[in-house]
Amino acid sequence: MLTLTNGGMDDTEDVTGDSQRDEVGVRPLTSSELALLDALLRHDFHGVHELRVQAHQVCASPGCTCGCGSLDLQVPDTVPRSPACSPVPVEGTVVGADGEPIGGLLLFVDGGRLSGLEVYSLDDDPLPMPHPDRVRWQTAA
Ligand SMILES: [Zn+2]
């Protein structure tokens, strides 16, 4: 397990000027969200090393308005950029209490940086971000 604490008080006012991005709602990831990201990034794929570094500095904001748990991810401009493709070639399957698949998880990268963790539902009900125990991971060929 990575311990992704927000080490120290280096209050990086680094809202680097890509437009006046509305920073409302930006927050650290919850422990459950971090555990999901950690589990996904434990797989090996091209560019994962940089993404693991980025995961130590990631913040999140709501990535969707439909009621699901999808997140927009934000990392500082100073992180090493990853050559990973997007979405990354590791996907999560979200399973329900009976073990049947009910949705999935995808991790997106934009410009070499973590940009989104999307949870999608296999039926019409939006899914919240699942507990890590409810996710089965598989690597795309
Ligand atoms: Zn949604």
Image (cartoon, helix red, strand yellow):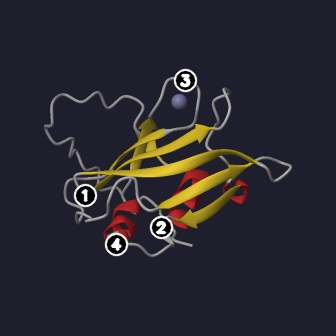
- Dot 2 lies on which element? helix
- What is the number of the mark on residue 112? 1
Of callouts 4 and 2, which one flags the residue occurring earlier in the amino acid sequence? 2
Mark 3 crowd level (few <14, some 14–19, many ≥20, 10 Å Cα):
few
Q: Residue at x 22, y 52 (%)?
A: 111
- Dot 1 lies on which element? loop
Relative depth, front residue between 132 and 105? 105
Where is residue 19 shown, x and y percent of the image?
15, 30
* Extreme residue in the right direction: 98
Q: Residue at x 35, y 68 (%)?
A: 53
Q: Is residue 43 above or below residue 27?
A: below
Of callouts 3 and 2, which one flags the residue occurring earlier in the amino acid sequence? 2
Mark 2 crowd level (few <14, some 14–19, many ≥20, 10 Å Cα):
some
Q: Is residue 42 above or below residue 29?
A: below
Mark 1 crowd level (few <14, some 14–19, many ≥20, 10 Å Cα):
some
Point out the image quarter for the N terminus: bottom right
Ligand 1 neighbours mark 2 (CB distance < 8 Å): no
Labels 1 & 4 near each other (Cβ < 8 A): no
Of callouts 1 and 4, which one flags the residue occurring earlier in the amino acid sequence? 4
| Residue on which the image places disc 3 | 66
Of callouts 3 and 4, which one flags the residue occurring earlier in the amino acid sequence? 4
Locate residue 98 relative to residue 66 in the image: left or right: right
Q: Is residue 137 above or below residue 109?
A: below
Q: Residues under labels 4 and 2: Cα distance?
A: 11 Å
Give the amino acid type for the residue marked by disc 1 in the picture. Answer: Gly
Q: Residues under labels 3 and 1: Cα distance?
A: 27 Å
| Residue on which the image places disc 2 | 41
Give the amino acid type for the residue marked by disc 4 in the picture. Answer: His
